[in-house]
Image (spheres, rainbow, N blue to C red):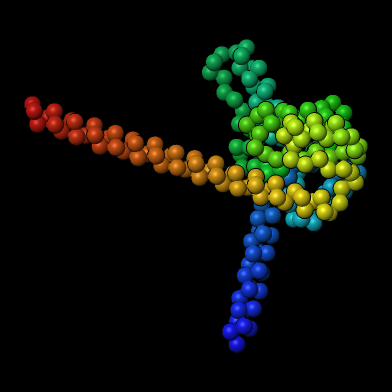
Amino acid sequence: MEIMESGAADTQQKHEEKYQQQTKEKHFHVLAVDDSLIERKLLERLLKVSSYQVTFVDSGDKALEYLGLLNSIDNVKATSSSSPSSSFQSPRQDQGMKVNLIITDYCMPGMSGYDLLKRVKGSYCKDVPVVIMSSENIPSRIGMCLDEGAEEFLLKPLQLSDMEKLQHHLLNSLEHSCERIDKSLNTDSNCIAVRNKSNSNHGSVSRARRQMI
């Protein structure tokens, strides 16, 4: 009897863990960048199987614009030639459209996937994992991208097994996001505590001065 109950408990726990994993996956937001419509359709089918939320763009410039990086660069240039009171346009990353992972083709017209990688890693989005994909297996290119901060270099055509490799990086991205939120909350709490203590000390000093008068 005890063995049956133990087995049932293990089964229930596995179901709960699987449900929690699926719930997390639904909150994963992937930004996919590829100039080829056929490749985007293939990637869409693979990512949808994993229940990820996916946004597709066909160029590196559009990816930067979606992330808010292109706008922030333009605003910096505009601000340097205008009055100091000019305000920056809020990037999308701060508007509830958090991207958990970027997957981009290497060879694209205009901005390459490698150039996009460097722009992302040199910005406030540097913690977002970037995965490069290419149909060409060139060791020097692969090493260059990994050295610049890419998490993976996947060879086309992509397979469902490649999507499973993304899961680890997505989970890490989600954990880092939670850590940043926790640190922010702790900082805010500490600031409030310091202000309260300062106000309390100020009140005590004021009362002491009144008593002396």
Query: 82 or 203, which is in the foreground?
Result: 203
Q: Is residue 25 above or below residue 197?
A: below
Extreme residue in the top direction: 81
Answer left or right for 138 relative to 130.
right
Q: Position of residue 98 (x, y in %)?
A: 65, 42
Question: In the drawing, does residue 133 fall left or right of residue 53?
Answer: right
Q: Position of residue 59 (x, y in %)?
A: 82, 33
Q: Which quarter of the figure has residue 10?
A: bottom right
x then y, percent, for residue 99: 68, 42
**Residue depicted at x 72% and y 51%:** 167
In the current view of this chain or complex, which residue is farthest to the bottom? Answer: 1
Residue 103 visible at all: no
Q: Is residue 190 above or below residue 69?
A: below
Residue 138: give x, y in percent of width and height.
89, 34
Whether residue 131 sits left or right of residue 79 in the image: it is right
Report the residue at 19% width, 34% height from top: 204
Q: Residue at x 83, y 29 (%)?
A: 112
**Quadrant in which residue 35 is drawn:** top right
Figure quadrant of the C terminus: top left
Q: Residue at x 9, y 31 (%)?
A: 211
On screen, residue 82 above or below 70: above
Number of numbered discs visible in the structure rendering: 0
